[in-house]
Image (tube, rainbow, N blue to C red):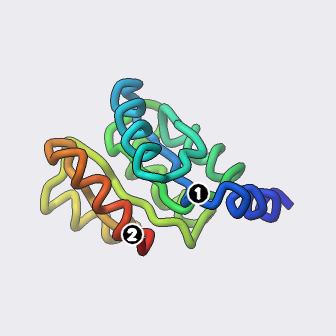
Amino acid sequence: MQRAESDRERRHHGGKTVLVVDDSPLVRRTVCSALLSDGFDVCGEANDGQEAIELTRKFFPDLIILDLSMPVMNGLQAAPVLRKLAPKSSIFLFTLHASEAVEQQLRTIEVDSVVSKREPLSKLMEEAHALLGD
C-alpha cells in the first residue's frame, strides 16, 4: 500500500526522488541544495544507515546517495538492506574513502557507483543524472 501511495506522490511531483544519507548536516544541506536546484525531488535526509532504511520503506526513492562512514549503521552495512528494500533504486556512495579496494568491495553488494567527496559537486550531479537516465 505504501508503495502505491509513493508512486502516486512521485508522479504528482514529476521529478526523480532522491534520499540523501550522510552524518554531516552540512554535507546533507549542500547535496540537497544542489539536487533541488537541478530539478530533483529530495524525498528525505538521513543521518545514518538505519534512518535510511526507515525512509526507504516510506518513500522508495529513485536514487539513494549514501555516505560510507556513519555511526549506528554505515554505508557498507546499509547498502545490501537498501538494495533488497528498493531493488529498482540506484544507490551510490558519496564518500571520502573512495579507493580501488572500496569500489571492489562495493561491487559485491550491488552499489551502482562511487563518487569521492573530493570531486567537485558537479561530478555528483553528473552521476545522479547518469544513473537515472536523464
Q: Are marks 1 and 2 in contact (CB under 8 Å)?
A: no
Mark identifier at residue 80: none
| In the image: residue 54, left or right of residue 49 | right
**120 and 47: which one is in front?**
120
Task: Assign the C terminus to one quadrant of the image.
Answer: bottom left
Location of mark 2 (residue)? 131
Q: Position of residue 97 (x, y in %)?
A: 19, 45
| C-alpha gap between disc 1 and disc 2 | 13 Å
| In the image: residue 92, left or right of residue 39 | left
Q: Residue furthest right?
A: 1
Q: Position of residue 20 (x, y in %)?
A: 46, 43
Report crowding for label 2: few under 14, some 14 to 19, many 20 or more residues within 10 A (C-alpha): some
Q: Could you say whether the residue bearing mark 1 is in a helix, strand or loop?
A: loop
Residue drawn at the location 37% of the way across and 58% of the way down: 92
Q: Position of residue 42 (x, y in %)?
A: 54, 45
Residue drawn at the location 24% of the way across and 45% of the way down: 121
- Residue 58's place in the image compared with 21, above or below, is below
Q: Quadrant of residue 107?
A: bottom left
Residue drawn at the location 35% of the way across and 33% of the way down: 30
Location of mark 1 (residue)? 61
**52 and 39: which one is in front?**
39
Badge 2 amino acid = Leu
- Residue 96's place in the image compared with 122, above or below, is above
| In the image: residue 56, left or right of residue 25 | right
Badge 1 amino acid = Pro
- Residue 108's place in the image compared with 26, above or below, is below
